[in-house]
Image (spheres, helix red, strand yellow):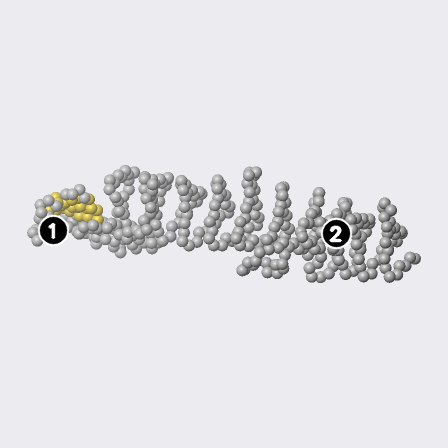
Amino acid sequence: MHAKPAKTYPDSIFKQTSADETQDTAEKITYCTITKDVNTRAEIYSRLFPDKTSAAICLDGPATGSSSAHITMDSIGRIKVLTGDRTDNSPVSGQLQVKTFGQIQQHMEASYIEYNAGQDDKEFALNVKAYGKICEECVGHQRTIKGEKIVIDANDLLVLKGQNVRIQAVGEIQLAGGQMTKVMVNDKEIILGQKMVFGAGEDTRFAFDPRSSVSVVSTGHVNHRILGDYNLETGGVMHMSGAGGTFAAPLITDNRQFGLRMNTLTKSFYGGNVSTQVNAPIVKIGGEKTPGIVKVNATDYSLDTSGKADMTIKGTSKYEVTGNLDIEGSDLTVKGANTVVEGTAQVEVKTSGGANIKLQGALIYLN
């Protein structure tokens, strides 16, 4: 298991756990010159502290200039390399320059490296260029990169590969590209706020698995506003139901007396290849606001209106029937303030089986 990343990071090379060792040098430190150049005053010498155990071999660079380098190899196996100071008369002064045909390094303990930008006008503290592949491997632990701003620039391809990949931010995450392709077994999004999609010219979804399904479950409202056509087609059965409930902040504010309402500014058509059934305790056909004409037309089929209870047809003007109209029932009553039965060719009133015909009124006119 990889270790968790640190929440705080050091601001220095290492944390000192003990005080610096000191040595009283009241007694004389012994120096012994091994060799010295008379022209540059460069010198190799040994140094022995009064404890007679802390010793070192030192190399001082030329002292003819304004700065000088220093190398020390001491008696505890430590090697110190100290370049000279940065001088104003040379941009490369104080540098450690190494040119090799390769290197092999093995460090048995932790390494601490600190780089500073110094006087660099581009503020580069570390600039590495490699003409070939670079491979870094962290075995059994975590590789952490921390910075104020981190930029990974790939001219061709950027691959992030891992058993688990996590991208997290306290602020905003932005993804920009010419095209995005996702290949995965499952896709899950957990959004605690709002989700918005802008500028999508086309949204197409294909599901080739016959077990696939699309479910939209919301405790709030669902609103579709489409300026073009809307085509909804299903190979199975389609059910639409509205409970007609009330909400503190409703999406539909007018005509909430209807649990399900469909309206069009032009003509509407509802039909089925076999039959169309309207089932409700009360069925009303008419305009909501302005009076007009409601037509019930069965072009190539018969029209059957039936009910287990009473059926009432009301109108302030006329009820016209074109074609044949057969009205049958056990008890049939035609009632009106002025009731007229008129036939342009023939009117026939008859009973079957020799039943009686009763005409009742104050005055009966036969003409």
User: Residue 129's image quarter?
Assistant: top left
Q: How far apart are marks 2 and 1 (CA)?
A: 114 Å
Q: Which residue is drawn at 55% across and 39% down?
A: 211
Residue 26 spot, x, y in % from top left: 8, 53
Q: Residue 300 carries which label?
A: none
Q: Which of marks 2 and 1 is nearer the N terminus?
A: 1
Side (left or right) of 306 relative to 229: right
* Residue 193 in view here: yes
Residue 159 spot, x, y in % from top left: 42, 42
Q: Which residue is drawn at 57% across and 56% down?
A: 245
Q: How crowded is mark 2: few (under 14 residues within 10 Å), some or many (20 or more)?
A: few
Looking at numbered disc 1 in the image, what kind of residue is underneath it?
Gln
* Above or below 194: residue 76: above
Q: Which of 287 and 114 is in front in this view?
A: 287
> Could you tell me which secondary element the residue under label 2 belongs to?
loop
Q: Mark 2 points at which residue?
A: 296
| Quadrant showing the N terminus | top left
Q: Which of 66 and 193 is in front in this view?
A: 193
Q: Name the residue under label 1.
A: 23
Side (left or right) of 245 relative to 302: left
| Quadrant showing the C terminus | bottom right
